[in-house]
Image (cartoon, rainbow, N blue to C red):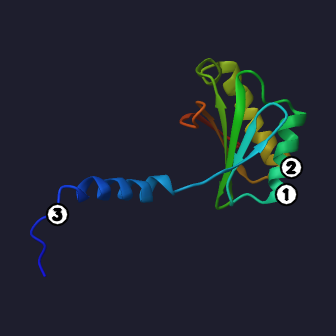
Amino acid sequence: MKIKYIPCFLIPSLVFFSFFNFYGCGHSYDKKQLDKGELYYDNTISQDKIEKLSSYINQCEIFNSDVHKARITQSDSIYEFSLGCSPQTYNSDQFQSFAELLAMQLSEDVFDHHRVMLHLTDDNFNQKITKSSGQ
């Protein structure tokens, strides 16, 4: 049977479901409320690492009025850590230097010397600047 045409009312539905399947379901994150912000994580991160990272964020007071969200995921042996912050913060040379040091400290203190890619992002986790632990 050969289809000659697709009814017009089906086209928006096909576009919507195609977009939803490819982008909407791609990655889901759980949220953990911390002292001064929120940590988002996915199923690639063990509960042990989530607790260790949460404790580290709280003890080091990483969250403040400019940084109040973080997200962690893992791909192979690389941890991808994102900090949601204001444009003034992620554009600051001083904060970018801090981010480089933070990536190295997270690698050593939380992630057993695995490589950490630290992304400075906006509040929606749109990547702006990336720093690496360099390993």
Q: Residue at x 13, y 82 (%)?
A: 1
Q: Residues within 10 Å of mark 1 (few under 14, many from 20)?
A: few
Residues at marks 2 and 3, CA–CA distance in whole angstroms = 54 Å
Expressed as whole percent of the image width and height from the top left, the position of residue 131 reads: 64, 37
Residue 48, label in figure? 1
The residue nearer to you, when weighing 95 against 121, is 121
Residue 102 lies left or right of residue 82; in this view the side is: right
- Disc 2 residue type (three-letter): Lys
Front position among marks 1 and 3: 3
Residue 6, label in figure? 3
User: Are the residues tagged 2 and 1 within 8 Å (C-beta)?
Assistant: yes
Q: Element at badge 3?
A: loop
Q: Element at badge 1?
A: helix
Mark 2 sits on what residue? 52
- Disc 3 residue type (three-letter): Ile
Q: Is residue 99 above or below residue 106?
A: above
Expressed as whole percent of the image width and height from the top left, the position of residue 9 reads: 22, 56
Please tell me which of labels 2 and 3 falls first in the chain. Answer: 3
Q: Quadrant of residue 132?
A: top right
